[in-house]
Image (cartoon, coloured by chain):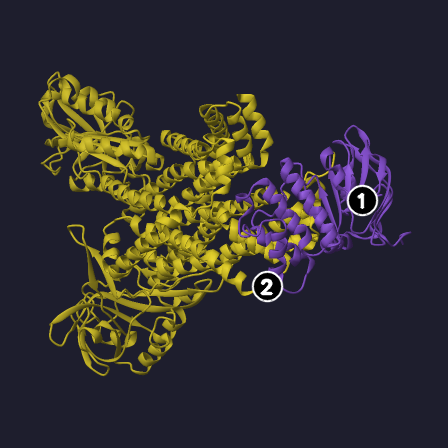
Amino acid sequence: MGENANYIIEIQNVGRTFNTASGPFQALKSVNASIPEGVLTILKGRSGSGKTTLLNIVGALDQPTTGRVIIEGQDVSRLNDYQRETLRRKKIGFVFQSVSLIPTMNAFQNVEFSMRMAGVKGDHKKRVEECLKMVGLGSRMHHMPSEMSGGEQQRVAIARAIAHGPSIILADEPTAELDSAMAAEVTKLFQEMTKKEHITIVMTTHDVGLMDAGDMVIELENGVQISQNAEA
Amino acid sequence: MLKVMLQKIWHKKWMVICLLLGSILLIATVVSFPLYRNASYDRMLVDEFDDYLAEKGEWPAMLKFMIMVQKDKNGETIGKMEKTLNELDGVLGVTGKEKVFYYSLSRAELASTTGRSDVDADGLRLGFMSGLPEHAKIISGRMFCDGGMDENGVIEVVVSQECLINNNLLVGETLEFLYMADKKGSPFRIKVVGVFEEQDSTDFYWQVRPSSLGIVALTDEQLFRDTFLGERAEKYTITCYYYDLFNYEDVTAVTANNLYDKTVYYQEQSGVKSTMSAPVYREIMERYFAKRTRIEATLFILQVPVLVLLGAFLFMISGQMYDMERNEISVMKSRGGSSAQMLRLYLYQSIFLAVIGAAGGIPLGAQFCKLLGSTQNFLEFNVRRRLNVTFDATVWKFAAGAMLACVLIMTIPALKHSRLTIVKLKQSNALKKSALWEKLFLDVILLGISLYGYYNYSKNKEMMVMSVMEGQSLDPLLYLSSSLFIVGMGLLFLRLQPWVIRLVYLLGKRFWRPASYAAFMENVKNGRKQQFIMLFMILTISLGMYHAVVARTILQNAKENEEYLVGSDILIKEVWTKTPSNSSNPNAGGPAFIEPDYRKYSSMPDVEAYTKVYSDASASFKTKDKGQMGCTLLAIQTKEYGLITDVSEEITEKAYRLYLNELATEPKGVLASSNLRDSLGFKIGDEVAYKDKYGTTIEAKIIDFFDYWPGYQPTSLVTGADGTAQKQTNTLLVANLATVQKKIGVYPYEIWAKLKPGCDSTNVYAWIRENDVHVNKFRDKAREMEQVVRDPLLQGTNGVLTMGFIVTIILCAVGYLIYWIMSIRSREMVFGVLRACGMHKGELFHMLIDEQLFSGVLSIFAGIGIGTLTSRMFVPMLQMAYAASNQVLPMKLIVNQTDMNRLYVVIAGVMATCLLTLLILVLKLNVTKALKLGEE
């Protein structure tokens, strides 16, 4: 069990080694962090610093070689595949760097799909509309992903990530393909969500301009955690 | 460029293997057509010649010339004739079997040198027959010596027995010609040294039988030539017969044309035309050519759908490959690669594949051809019956054509892609539009055309039968109608399928589990992309079914019909000798015969039952108002006849045995064919007076009418003098043998026998030989059935359909698998997203199964449905094109469950492989890799 129930995510001595053609490559070395509920955490670092690897491990998409991740007091590394998948679909929302919408579904259906996956009961339509309005796409609900710009698609992805009411949103470079105004807007949206919906958000970025937006910043360099500054 | 191409090919090896498979099959199918055609035509021609030989006992492949030469200066005319004759085989392109020159001088009077005065005064013809010593048997005396002249200058001759007797000659006697002298003026003398006859009476050398040489004395050829020909020829009148026999077994489909053309030339244009008799084989060949045209057209028509499918397969796979390369192409283009360069790259690739395809396809085509020739039944082969495969120019032309087609089909999809830039690609990705065929209502149009064809043909069935009878091939439009029907139905299904899916989706919109939901969305949005593969599945399955049913039905009906027409397993009619004219005649109107011993048949081996059947095809009966009318009289022993023959109850009004019982209980009654009732107004209980061929009248009471009777053809088509077919009604009366024999006497009857189960006629043949039974007529049902199967048209049809079925199944399996695997692979990213969102592997698998259900499985069912419907509609008409001339039994649609099961097993195998591949894919799917997450 976690040492402190207030921390929704606890990262304990997490290391990850990949077996590559040129021998083992250590992407993460003993990272430790405890993230409280309802904060926006920014994972910072240059390309190749291991931030996406860490995010994948937190999101139970990948397994750490050493250490463990505890989410809501539950040791993720002790869960089997099926339980991890269930954890993902109920508790976690993902926003990926590249286009991650299902191309055969329109914006509405994409968002509604995550509710279907999580098995959310009740009126989906209202919630979907609410989420899409929140990301500013209330008027483009029935457009297909291919008919939307990159920023719009990313916002649909965010709406999808929150629709089923997860406690955690993991966003991998959500702003990388957006212009700076749009990036700021997305970040602002994240901030609002932590406040309004009390969601814990972890996002990676290498955009220095966004660092201040976070309640908490974890900085990685070559797989090593070089700083963690919690909100004062 | 070559390196780029080879790299590309290696990179896409699975697609390339598919393209190769398609090219190989396409080329093999195309090449097998001329190969099979030639090989089966060879056999067909030989069969035609064989039939003639068997029927007439004469060697059919023979040319005969006769010339009578008078005052031939220096023997020029004869010299020219001989030159022509010696060149003949070479010009005709055949190998000689026997060449017989038979020359004789005009008849000249002779006198015996011994002074015997009763020698026939009209004299003899002196002559020679080339090769005589090798073919003749001396029955008295000896053969003339080498050189033909004894030391006294006397010409030695041999004569036939007829000549010896007719002319009252003696062996060993020397005769002197009264008015024929040699150079010195002394009369020619001949000495009869022997009497000859045929060494072997079946030897085709004997075009002139010794028995017909009643006034001919034959001597040595060289002596005759030296003495009477050349410079000396002008002094004599010489009659020359030339017989040129050649081996018809060696005539092939390729050499047949030349043979025929040259024969016609000799007969109609050459300098020797007036001396030539019309060769019998000309008619045989004409019949063969007519049959050949019909077969060629029919087989070609049957192959078209398979070729179209093969083309579609290549088109689809290469399209798929280019789709996969779209990104590469557009990147290359954006970096300055020209369209022409792209196109050239693909052209080279296509040529490369086509060449390898030809290297594999041509030998495979030869195997296909062998397979075709050994087809016994649909999907059944008899390995012992193989065709000779010969490659001639046509085969290479076909192969070249097929290669060209392959190259075009594989390059055309590139045309579209080579103009693509990355910008256009993005634009086209965003576009969605309905397919051209949907906008054009192609499905409706095709269905309209095919149904019009269907309607037209079903209205004009009679006309079709007639036209087939006149030797026309299967009407291409009829077969086309059925193919168009299949395509039209397939397209219609594709038009309706999305609506069905949408309806099901809407019905349970709120309740669908995520997996099914995602599958529905995939199908609703991306279904269009799958239309081609779905159509392909539908076409392969329905064509496969249709072909199976066509092949089975045609063959089975032909067999059953033959079985019906032949009547019994074995039919033997002995040679009956007439009784000496002075003995009393027990028969009423005709000649008296000595009945052969009937009891001996009890020792016939392998026979279950046998009976006497008297059949008289020249009987007649008195109609109510149209005078005397011809009919066939069949007199039977009901009990035994019933054991030996049968007619399926499916087609008779009441059980066949009941008819026999009625006849058995009414000795004086007759059973009559139903046309007596239907068109001549007879009723049951009416008296009918019929006459046998010798004019004896028998009064009988009609006890029943039948539609079918073993061997009875209610109507037959006869080809008139102008080549048009006419329908003729046949009447049959069946009476008790005892009654008939009592009235008219005992005439040569037939023995009908039924073999024990599992026995063939081998032992019966042996029994006939051992017991020295002189057989006048012998029919063996098994052999006739085999001939039906061996008929080149039927066999070719069977072969083409079997081959088509196999090719179709391969295509269906490979096509579907490849399409699925490729399209699934291209969606890995989406699967990654789904998995990241927490979709379980089982759900992902479930989703893919659902997708298969919506496209693949639905297509399979549609294919089965369309195949069944097409068979029901079109097979009855197609069948007519095959069995029109003597088809009696009503056509039955034969659906062989085993064939269907084979088809289903293959489909199930394909689907299982698909599922397995999907399962592996899902299990192996790495989410982070699929989403390109994380560092590697």
Percent position of residue B817, x then y = 57, 46
Amino acid on which the number 2 mark rests in the picture: Arg
Pinpoint the chain carrying mark 1: A
Give me the disc on residue B510: 2
Residue B582 lies left or right of residue B833; in this view the side is left
Amino acid on which the number 1 mark rests in the picture: Gln
Q: Nearer the viewer, residue B721 or B750?
A: B721
Locate residue B407: give its quadrant. top left
Measure how far apart labels 2 and 1 are at the Cα level: 35 Å
Q: Residues within 10 Å of mark 2 (few under 14, many from 20)?
A: few
Which of the chains is yellow?
B
Which of the chains is purple?
A
Q: Which residue is at 11% across, 72% downward?
A: B626
Percent position of residue B74, x then y = 13, 17
Percent position of residue B531, x then y = 47, 49
Helix, strand or loop for disc 1: loop
Residue B360 lies left or right of residue A162; in this view the side is left
Instruction: Have a look at marks 2 and 1 and say if they share a chain.
Output: no
Would you say residue B884 is visible in this rendering?
no
Q: Nearer the viewer, residue B809 or A34?
A: A34
Farthest-out residue, right: A3
Helix, strand or loop for disc 2: loop
Q: Nearer the viewer, residue A12 or B144?
A: A12
Percent position of residue B559, x then y = 39, 58
Give me the disc on residue A63: 1
Q: Nearer the viewer, mark 2 or mark 1?
A: 2
Residue B935 lies left or right of residue B450; in this view the side is right
Image quadrant holding the C terminus of chain B, namely top right
Pinpoint the chain carrying mark 2: B
